[in-house]
Amino acid sequence: MQYTEAFFMKALISFRDADIMAGENVVVHGLNMEIAPGDLVYILGKVGSGKTSIIRTVTAENPLEKGEAEACGFSLKGLRQRDIPKLRRKLGVVFQDFRLLMDRSVWENLDFILKATGWKDRKAADARIDEVLEAVGMTTKAHKMPHQLSGGEQQRIAIARALLNSPEVILADEPTGNLDEETAEEILRLLNKLNKENGTTLIMVTHDRSIVERYPGRVFVCQDESCTEQ
């Protein structure tokens, strides 16, 4: 795909000749990637090919030392520590292992995130929690503890958590990796719905090419220390 300067200006996420690090090692050399609002993008590849490292660079967990990159209006190269929380409020991240706080109820898990990201209006926070639980079909589970939920239900709560601050982008890192086939399909339908109906940009890391066949989108493949669009 050929990109114009106008496209670069409107892209939500862009990499230009960027080296992606994992620790002290470069795992992807010279990444060029432009993702526009509303895109559905898959990053495919084997374990260790750099897929998750790209996501970690977008969220400013991994530093960018060579090349240029932007995410949601923030330059990732030399990003100031105080700006990282501002960037992350524009991103919703869904992990393979859910990462819920096991000593808190569903409602308390979501409330914790709102408090951590600066929500002070109690009424508005309560309403937002209700909205995201409804969006993922979990309104009756607010009082439950995570261990009382199935894996699919926990992942739905994780998606609700990702939606709390109305992110411009959802980054889903192997979101169905710990789920059975039927439950995984439910989660994929939910994520696809958020992309198609809400217009939320979705970037999904996966090793499963069959997902792309069922829910078509743009595809980048990581292999041999590179990542290119197919």
Image (cartoon, rainbow, N blue to C red):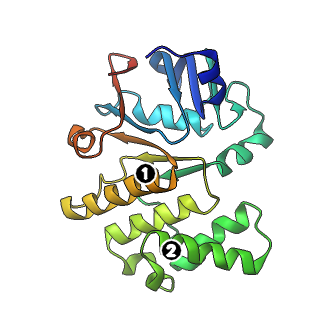
Where the C terminus falls, by quadrant? Answer: top left
Q: Position of residue 48 (x, y in %)?
A: 35, 30
Q: Is residue 116 above or below residue 226?
A: below
Q: Position of residue 60 (x, y in %)?
A: 63, 37
Which amino acid does the dot numbered 1 rest on?
Lys
Q: Position of residue 8 (x, y in %)?
A: 62, 22
230 sits left or right of 118 in the view: left
On residue 133, which mark appears? 2
Q: Which residue is mark 1?
A: 196
Q: CA distance from mark 2 to mark 1?
A: 19 Å
Q: Is residue 198 above or below residue 203?
A: below
Q: Residue at x 48, y 69 (%)?
A: 135
Which amino acid does the dot numbered 2 rest on?
Leu
Q: Position of residue 45 (x, y in %)?
A: 30, 30
Q: Residue at x 27, y 58 (%)?
A: 184
Where the N terminus falls, by quadrant? Answer: top left
Mark 2 vs mark 1: in front: 1
The total number of labels drawn is 2
Q: Residue at x 38, y 17 (%)?
A: 225
Q: Crowdedness of circle 1 by 10 Å Cα count: few (<14), some, many (20+)?
A: some
Q: Nearer the viewer, residue 117 or 169?
A: 169
Q: Crowdedness of circle 2 by 10 Å Cα count: few (<14), some, many (20+)?
A: many
Q: Residue 219 is drawn in which quadrant?
A: top left
SS at mark 2 in the image: helix
205 sits left or right of 99 in the view: left
On residue 84, which mark appears? none
221 sits left or right of 200 in the view: left
Q: Nearer the viewer, residue 27 or 191?
A: 191
Q: Residue 81 is drawn in which quadrant?
A: top right
